[in-house]
Image (cartoon, rainbow, N blue to C red):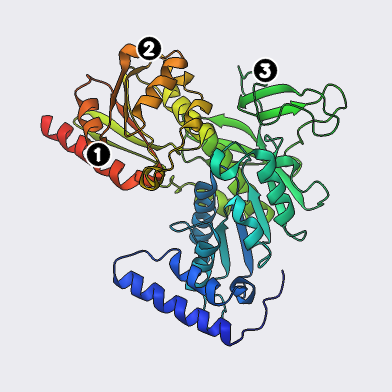
């Protein structure tokens, strides 16, 4: 690992100001998850270079699943008795990474914990990895994201390829042909993936990778799960997705476990946080990096038994005999939203009620609304017969309704309203069935309040 630069007066001033600002923000009831780091970097631009990194530094990046995967890795390490520095509750850009590391460092920049698991935004990689060298970097996927922020998958792959230090060992998703192609000249690459399941599609409909990166011929697929996630091949030159070193070879959704095969015949049975295929990939990536780092399989297995998905991503309660579930659906992210729709549609039950509150609060505040991502998202899962009433709530409810109609969703089961609270009341008056709230991360507080109001009314009615 790259040695930290020697401390100087500017670094000491930056550390002092940052720690004092963090203390003041905490005293005022603020989380202080980003501002102290911004102050530190402003005073000392190479602040991260002067911090001594923990003995083991694991970074997690990719379009979707960064927070879940990094939290899974942290949970396993903490249950194994390690002190872990993490930015799970804060920002994954330079200021947030600096805040997490300085908070767990002495005034002279020495780490208080043996390990660090840091979530890193893809576009921030160029700013962060020039100052610190991860031992391991997990990349879950590279998919279309916010068009106005992350442009195109080729752009993000270029940034990551240019930023990742050559010494870092990469743990890449073999089932993502864009992600698995990162840093092609590196010899420090391992892959994880999930073997074929019955009934999977063989038609590649992706718009993010259509042509072979080697010869330019149109790609074909052995199987595709969603978007470009699957096993791709080139009929012309023989290019194909790499074989995973860590492969999920069996999924038991009833018991909530999966079998991970690795190391030429070894297997490990692990609990998954839920049945969503996206989270099975997250669990697989977390287990792969821990095994690659040399952690005993039995300790990983024991720690996985008590793992749970982050509550801000997925949580369920029952009130008045009705199950009320909150499921994260990232606004501006068409693939993540489409996966949330598909997952809810795949769950057991009839007449499921959906309250969709994907309303980008920051866009509304700054008056720079962009609705193009809605029309880039696949709403066809909402046609599933198990989905009853759908309420689109928020300022963009009319765009959501129009996109659903374009996808062929029955207009008779769609309701719209501008207010989030009104959406909660509307879903309650829409009949029976379990309730699913699909919420944007930027309105988590408002969505939770709506969920609690729904649960309260259901309990009182009971």
Q: Between 334 and 228, which is closer to the camera in this rendering?
A: 334
**First in sequence: mark 2 vs mark 3:** 3
Q: Is residue 432 left or right of residue 113?
A: left
Callout 3 crowding tier (Cα within 10 Å): few <14, some 14–19, many ≥20: some
**First in sequence: mark 3 vs mark 1:** 3
The residue lying at 27 percent from left, 32 percent from top is 418
- CB of mark 2 within 8 Å of CB of mark 1? no
Q: How far separated are the C-alphas under marks 2 and 1? A: 26 Å
Does residue 253 show up?
no
Residue at far bottom of view? 9
Q: Between 401 and 294, which is closer to the camera in this rendering?
A: 401
Residue 267 falls in which quadrant of the image? top right
Q: Nearer the viewer, mark 2 or mark 1?
A: 2
Q: Is residue 177 left or right of residue 429?
A: right
Callout 2 crowding tier (Cα within 10 Å): few <14, some 14–19, many ≥20: some
Q: Secondary structure at mark 3?
A: loop
Residue 320 in the image, given as x and y percentages of width and height: 18, 31
Residue that numbered label 2 is attached to: 410
Residue that numbered label 3 is attached to: 203
Residue 198 falls in which quadrant of the image? top right
Callout 1 crowding tier (Cα within 10 Å): few <14, some 14–19, many ≥20: some
Which image quarter is the N terminus in?
Answer: bottom right
Q: Is residue 286 above or below residue 294?
A: above
Q: How far separated are the C-alphas under marks 3 and 1? A: 40 Å
Residue that numbered label 1 is attached to: 450
Which image quarter is the C terminus in?
Answer: top left
């Amino acid at each position: 690992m790259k040695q930290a630069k020697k401390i100087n007066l500017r670094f000491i001033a930056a550390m002092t100001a940052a720690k004092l600002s963090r203390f003041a923000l905490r005293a005022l009831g603020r989380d202080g998850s980003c501002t102290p780091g911004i102050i530190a970097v402003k005073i000392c631009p190479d602040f991260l270079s002067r911090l001594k990194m923990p003995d083991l530094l694991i970074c997690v990046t990719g379009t979707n699943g960064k927070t879940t995967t990094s939290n899974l890795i942290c949970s396993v390490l903490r249950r194994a008795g390690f002190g872990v520095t993490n930015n799970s509750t804060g920002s994954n850009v330079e200021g947030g990474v600096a805040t997490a590391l300085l908070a767990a460092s002495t005034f002279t920049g020495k780490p208080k914990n043996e390990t660090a698991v840091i979530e890193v935004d893809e576009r921030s990689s160029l700013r962060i990895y020039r100052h610190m060298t991860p031992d391991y970097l997990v990349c879950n996927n590279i998919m279309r994201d916010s068009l106005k922020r992350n442009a195109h998958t080729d752009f993000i792959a270029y940034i990551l390829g240019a930023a990742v230090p050559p010494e870092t060992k990469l743990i890449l998703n073999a089932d993502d042909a864009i992600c698995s192609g990162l840093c092609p000249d590196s010899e420090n690459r391992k892959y994880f993936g999930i073997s074929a399941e019955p009934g999977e599609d063989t038609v590649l409909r992706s718009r993010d990778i259509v042509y072979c990166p080697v010869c330019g011929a149109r790609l074909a697929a052995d199987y595709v799960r969603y978007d470009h996630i699957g096993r791709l091949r080139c009929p012309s030159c023989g290019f194909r997705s790499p074989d995973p070193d860590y492969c999920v070879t069996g999924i038991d959704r009833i018991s909530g476990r999966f079998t991970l095969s690795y190391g030429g015949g070894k297997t490990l049975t692990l609990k998954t946080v839920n049945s969503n295929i996206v989270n099975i990939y997250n669990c697989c990536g977390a287990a792969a990096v821990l095994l690659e780092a040399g952690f005993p399989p039995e300790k990983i297995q024991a720690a996985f038994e008590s793992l749970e998905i982050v509550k801000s991503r997925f949580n369920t309660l029952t009130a008045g005999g009705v199950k009320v579930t909150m499921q994260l659906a990232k606004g501006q992210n068409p693939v993540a939203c489409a996966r949330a729709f598909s997952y809810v549609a795949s769950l057991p039950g009839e007449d499921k009620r959906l309250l969709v509150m994907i309303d980008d609060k920051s866009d509304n505040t700054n008056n720079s609304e962009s609705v193009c991502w809605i029309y880039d998202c696949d709403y066809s899962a909402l046609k599933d017969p198990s989905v009853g009433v759908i309420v689109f709530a928020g300022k963009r409810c009319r765009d959501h309704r129009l996109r659903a109609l374009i996808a062929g969703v029955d207009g008779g089961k769609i309701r719209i309203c501008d207010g989030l609270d009104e959406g909660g009341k509307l879903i309650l008056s829409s009949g029976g069935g379990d309730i699913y709230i699909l919420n944007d991360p930027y309105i988590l507080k408002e969505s939770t309040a709506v969920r609690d109001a729904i649960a309260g009314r259901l309990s009182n009615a009971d």
